């Protein structure tokens, strides 16, 4: 899971019930994070996946955008009952 060559950071996760705090290298980034997941696997460095909170976003429209769903995500969604849409090239 952990990409090679990525810089390492000090991460602290604190929870007091419904209030959570995430600091990275001593900087509290809680206000900018929607969610995070700490991945721990034997033989690998811990990996923190962070989903940022979007506070302000202008509307963007794109014609013919491609939506990509990673294979592992699609497999999980299918296992939960999702039916993938047909591919346009089929």
Image (spheres, rainbow, N blue to C red):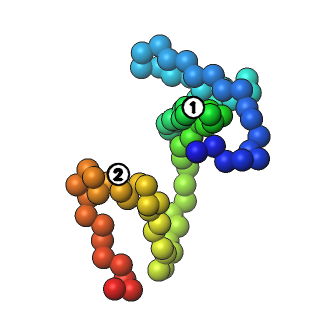
Q: Is residue 65 left or right of residue 88?
A: right
Mark 2 vs 1, N-terminal side: 1
Give the residue drawn at x 51%, y 63%: 59
Q: Looking at the picture, tell me which residue is in the foreground, 48 or 18.
A: 48
Q: Is residue 7 left or right of residue 22?
A: right
Residue at which label 2 appears: 76
Residue at which label 1 appears: 42
Give the residue drawn at x 58%, y 45%: 1
Quarter occupied by residue 18:
top left
Where residue 51 appears, x then y in whole percent?
53, 43
Where residue 26 appears, x then y in whole percent?
73, 23
Q: Looking at the picture, tell me which residue is in the foreground, 87 or 24.
A: 87
Give the residue drawn at x 26%, y 50%: 80
Of all residues, the one furthest to the left in this rendering is 81
Q: Mark 2 and mark 1: span between their CA atoms?
A: 22 Å
Where residue 2 appears, x then y in whole percent?
63, 43
Give the residue drawn at x 72%, y 47%: 4
Q: Is residue 74 left or right of residue 9?
A: left
Of all residues, the one furthest to the bottom in this rendering is 89
Q: Looking at the rendering, in which quadrant would you find the C terminus? A: bottom left
Circle 1: element type? loop
Q: In this rendering, which labeled residue sits more in front, label 2 or label 1?
A: 1
Quarter occupied by residue 81:
bottom left
- Specify the label residue 60 is tagged with: none
């Amino acid at each position: 899971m952990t990409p090679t060559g990525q810089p390492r950071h000090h991460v602290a996760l604190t929870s007091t019930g419904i209030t959570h705090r995430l600091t990275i290298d001593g900087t509290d980034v809680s206000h900018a994070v929607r969610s995070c997941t700490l991945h721990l696997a034997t033989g690998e460095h811990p990996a923190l996946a962070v989903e940022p909170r979007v506070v302000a976003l202008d509307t963007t429209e794109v014609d013919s955008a491609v939506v990509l769903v990673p294979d592992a995500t699609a497999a999980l969604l299918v296992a939960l009952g999702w039916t993938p849409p047909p591919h346009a090239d089929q």
